[in-house]
Amino acid sequence: MRGRLTSTVRARRVLVAVAAVVASLAAGTNGVSGVAGAQDTEKVPPPVWTSLVATPITSARPVLGADGRIHLTYELLVTNVSPSVMTFDRLETLDASKGHADVNTESGSTVVATLEGADLEAATQSLGRPNTVPVGPFQVTRLFLDATFAKNATLPTALEHRFQITLEPAAGTPPVTSATVVSGRTKVANARAVVVGPPLAGPRWVDSGGCCFPPSYHRTATLPINGKFAVPERFAMDFLQLNPENKLYAGPQDQLSSYAYQGAKVLAVADGTVVDLQDGRPDETPPNFPEGYTLLEALGNFVVVDIGHGRFAFSTHFQPNTLKVKVGDKVRRGQVLALMGNSGNSDAPHLHFAILDGPSPFSSYSLPFVFSSFTTTGTITNAIEDIQSGAAAEIAPAQAGPHRNELPLENDVITFPKQ
């Protein structure tokens, strides 16, 4: 009986504490979150209740884009821990190199990026489909962020995020209108992007689903693998090739022979050792994605090459039975690995390419990389979906010209040097 009474007392105390939290949130209490890395600084902020908690999946990593800017690209999981519906009104990314930032928007914290309006909505992606904005009570959403800096800028060593939010209370709770919360301390990796050679040769290759903002389908691929979120596609890109009329195909859309680049040679981007591969998966019929595949089957025919220093080059969607290598083979930069196809989770012939921090295409993390040399014709301005339906690509001259040691950005049209 004593234990039962003790449990009852404890339950009442918990209810009182929860009521206090709800009341403080309803009163618009502002504060600094103690999440993610308070031990990294000498000054630890005092404990205060907050209406949200933001947590990075992994550190931000810098890469020099074809726009001449350094991109710090990363993700946050954001939990609404209030009983109210939460709307993000404004998000300021802060340089937290010297310690925790303050909720006071007039403080000396350096703002390195700001999102609001349509851009903030584009950065916010729920875990479910369709996307839900605002965020419901006690729900989780994701933010896909990209802070950019001048090419020679000194980068922050850590970032924090000042959220300005609106809370619309549920029935029976005190009225709340707004709050400011600092959360989501994120380390910035002190590492250079690896320089690699071209995976293809020739003109009019389109970087589809590439970096960095608005977030592409690769950027938003935060995958629940083995009990944790993995980010294997943060810097990944799909390469498709336009024909001389700037179209993807000439002829019936559902015939692979209509795609002139079907069967293009896919090249090793660096010297290394083949550590994993898959072959024998059939080419799919465009323009539909296959259904009912396991995770391994969805990869199609692929090759993983260990290129050293904890980096692995992943290339996939090859034609079946065209792989020129086997596990254990040493490969040289520029060597043909296989022929481009449409195997696995694919709706048109293309090459999916990424650099990973491990040999597993699913549970590894995407690493930044730059190509040693390429030329950009420009950037596609009409919807990729229209081009996939047969329309000609409309190309504006943005970022046109030669590039060295840079990362192509989404929808750039690229010429790789012939090998």
Image (cartoon, rainbow, N blue to C red):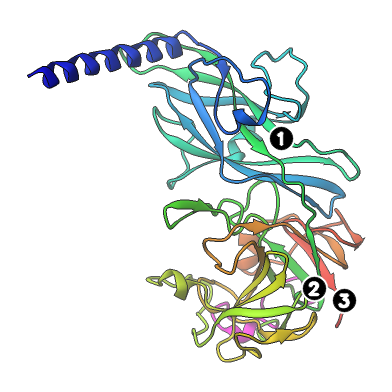
Q: Amino acid at mark 2?
A: Pro
Q: Which mark is residue 198?
A: 2
Closer to the N terminus: mark 3 or mark 1? 1
Q: Amino acid at mark 3?
A: Pro
From where the camera sits, is residue 238 visible? no
From where the camera sits, is residue 310 visible? yes
- The answer for how far apart the CA atoms under marks 3 and 2 are is 8 Å
- Residue appearing at x 55%, y 13% in the figure: 30
Q: Which mark is residue 59?
A: none
Look at the numbered discs 3 and 2 and tell me whether their residues touch, using CB distance below 8 Å. Answer: yes
Q: Main SS type for the magenta part?
A: loop
- The answer for how far apart the CA atoms under marks 3 and 1 are is 38 Å
> Given this view, does label 3 or label 1 mark the residue nearer the observer?
1
Which contiguous range is marked in magenta? 243-260
Q: Is residue 183 above or below residue 370?
A: above
**Observer-nearest residue: 307 or 294?**
307
Mark 1 — residue?
158
Closer to the N terminus: mark 3 or mark 2? 2
Closer to the N terminus: mark 1 or mark 2? 1
User: Dot 1, crowdedness within 10 Å: few (<14), some or many (≥20)?
Assistant: many
